[in-house]
Amino acid sequence: MTHNAYPHLFGQTTLGSVPMRNRTCVAPMTRISATDDGVPTDIMVDHYQTYAKGGWGLVFTEGTYVDEAHAQGYVNQPGMANKDHAAGWRRVVDAVHAQNTPIFQQFIHAGGLIQHNRYEQTGIAPSRVDQLGQMMPHYFGEGPFPEPREITKDEMKEVASSFAAAARRAVDAGFDGVEIHGANGYLLDQFLTTFANVRTDEYGGSTENRIRFHCEVLAAVLNAVGSRIPVGIRISQTKVNNFDYQWPGKADDARIIFSALKAIGPTYIHVSTHKGLEEVWNSGRNLADWAKEIWGGPTIACGGLQDAARADLLIADGHADFCAIGKGALADPAWPEKILAGDEPIAFNPGMIKPHATLQNTLDWRAAN
Ligand SMILES: Cc1cc2nc3c(=O)[nH]c(=O)nc-3n(C[C@H](O)[C@H](O)[C@H](O)COP(=O)(O)O)c2cc1C
């Protein structure tokens, strides 16, 4: 191994109580490779273990649905909604731990962005409005999303309980931490988003109201498992169905959102963007900067950070504590080892998103690569 050119990125550290060999994380990435009923497969065991062998400090799972009511969004998405799911994930966890690497599980509720749900075909969302954008063909969706119905307040309580129950299963399955997916346009983020939330009650209107459901879910999960493992939450402006959305109140919204989450007390906040972590609102700072300054605790930044020099500088300058890498990790699961060795990692190309879903797809892809 050559001299470590990026000492800030590759220094040993901890996240909460979890030791990490460095500050690189595999970002959560949906791979739709579970069984039809959401149980992790051999291919997923292999997939996650490959990252663990590649030298990452922490591996995030893909977004995993939390209940059998409405949470699933994609065909062959994995769940953490029952004991079969948990038993399947135990195998993934053991494989990653065998490489001395921690693994956190990300929990998702699709809300209105349902492309496939084996339990119920109608999505539930803050408001009964058309969802922007189209279903994603690479996850076998086509055309507009079905119109959701408005979630009831009882269902909101059930959703928070489902996140908490999934988190308890995650602890039992050996996960080192859990993350609530509060970003990217799914249920929680729909509450935060003005075009998806036209409610007039205490969950709509002001930014304080629109971040309320995030806080309730976070509190439920912290209450369930917070004394045992780290609990984080992911936040973004951009969405899978709108890469351009910005919080209308800009920095004022950032202050309200990150202060509200801080008051609940997560272990960390994970800030992501689909367009690369760039300056927001002509403020001279990116969203991770804003999070770090307002909330002040451990902050994971994600978006275009496969440039190791940039990631190292971000940490050196105190703008983030950890860097999560999505497409760069997909392209080269050994990205950290290659960077440390001074080798060039394999670059991402869009064709790499597609080979997932079935064992045969992945085997074909491996044979061709
Ligand atoms: C194939 C794919 C699947 C993704 N699935 C998820 C997911 O399940 N949960 C999530 O929070 N973000 C998901 N993302 C977003 C990434 O975590 C990350 O925020 C985004 O790709 C930007 O980072 P990058 O520039 O390093 O790729 C996904 C991204 C890709 C490319």
Image (cartoon, grey):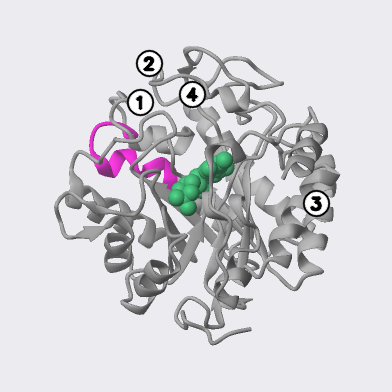
Numbered disc 3: secondary structure: helix
The label shown at residue 112 is 4
Distance Cα–Cα, label 1 vs label 4: 9 Å
> Residue 45: which disc?
3
Does mark 2's beta carbon lie closer than 8 Å to ligand 1? no
Residue 25 lies in the magenta stretch: no
Q: Is residue 164 left or right of residue 173?
A: left
Quadrant (top left/top right/bottom left/bottom right) for the C terminus: top right
Local SS, label 2: loop
Give the vertical position of 136 relative to 225 (above or below).
above
Tag 3: amino acid: Val
Q: Quadrant of residue 38?
A: top right
Q: Secondary structure at mark 4?
A: loop
Q: CA distance from mark 2 to mark 4?
A: 9 Å
Q: Are marks 2 and 4 in contact (CB under 8 Å)?
A: yes
Label pair 3/1, CB-CB below 8 angstroms: no
Which of the marked residues, 3 or 2, is nearer the chain's N terminus?
3
Residue 88 is situated, as x and y percent measured from the top left of the image, at: 83, 46
298 to 143, vertically: above or below: below
Q: CA distance from mark 2 to mark 1?
A: 7 Å
Reading the chain from its start, which is encountered first: label 2 or label 1? 2
What residue is rendered at 46% in x and 19% in y? 134
In 3D space, how far apart are the residues under numbered discs 3 and 1 (Cα atoms)? Answer: 36 Å
The Cα atoms of the two marked residues, 4 and 3, are separated by 29 Å
Residue lying at the far left of the rendered structure: 282
Q: Is residue 297 visible?
A: no
Q: What number is the disc on residue 129?
A: 2
Tell whether label 1 touches label 2 (CB within 8 Å).
yes
Work out whether 10 lies above or below 60.
below
The residue that disc 1 covers is: 196
Q: Nearer the viewer, mark 4 or mark 3?
A: 3
Q: Disc 3 and disc 2: Cα gap in Å?
A: 38 Å
